[in-house]
Amino acid sequence: MKTIILVPTMYSEEDLKETLGKVPPDFHKESEEFWSYIGEKLRQIAPSIHAIYLAWSEETVDPRAAHIVDFLQGNGVEVHRLEDRTLVGEARAWYLMAHGSGGGVEEVFLEEVDRELSDVLRRMLVSSLGDTKMGVIFFEPACKLSLGDDVRVIRMSPFDPLDYLTRHLVRKRISEE
């Protein structure tokens, strides 16, 4: 059985400036804790990792995330990027719209994007990762990935970056009222 480690990416300063209009005061501490944890855990199991799948927005990725991927790639891990890079951006946009509107039709579109992204990732796993191999997926935390019953999934994260973003979106909305 394939093993996939899901790593939701912590939002970068650029992401937060774009989404919140500013960088929260606790961002540097939280981000450092997040990426230190991920880096340490992945370095410990690096010899077992065979492939990395990037389902993130390359334009705003945190340099520490890129450094972790570079480290693993330097140790022989194969890197795969989504061909349709708009899917990740769509997922984030639909999440933000659903969060701002209280749900509804936006959630339906978010679910559709999640299904499409999950389908693309499943096809990538089938074509590039052996049955007993381990891979890592770095992904936009707004996405809800479903990889199937034939894949063992381990979520690696000291906290959910989406919760961090949501907390600050709620604070922003309250302060604007």
Image (tube, grey):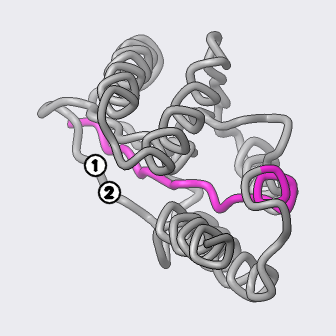
- The C terminus: image quadrant: bottom right
Going by the numbered disc 2, the residue's amino acid type is Ile
Q: Residue at point 72% right, 35% down?
A: 57
State whether residue 114 appears in this view: yes
Q: Residue furthest front?
A: 177
- Locate residue 65: give its quadrant: bottom right
Q: How many marks?
A: 2
What is the spatial separation of the Cα atoms under label 2 and label 1, in whole angstroms?
4 Å
- 9 to 171, vertically: above or below: above
- Observer-nearest of 36 and 59: 59
Residue named by callout 1:
153
| Nearest the eye: 118 or 67 | 118
Circle 1 residues within 10 Å: few <14, some 14–19, many ≥20: some
Dot 2 lies on which element? Answer: strand
Residue ID for mark 2: 154
Q: Look at label 1 and name its amino acid.
A: Val
Q: Is residue 139 visible?
A: no
In percent of width and height, residue 32 lies at 75, 81
Give the crowd class for mark 2: few <14, some 14-19, many >=20 residues within 10 Å: few
Q: What is the x, y in percent for residue 85? A: 67, 19
Seen from the viewer's position, the closer of residues 48 and 65 is: 65
Callout 1 secondary element: strand
> Camera-side residue: 127 or 34?
34
Determine contact: label 2, label 1, CB under 8 Å.
Answer: yes
Kindly indicate the quadrant of the structure image that contains residue 96.
Answer: top right
User: Which residues lie in the magenta part?
Assistant: 1-18
Question: Is 6 covered by the magenta stretch?
Answer: yes
Q: Residue furthest left?
A: 149
Q: Quadrant of the N terminus?
A: top left
Q: Residue at x 57, y 38 (%)?
A: 92
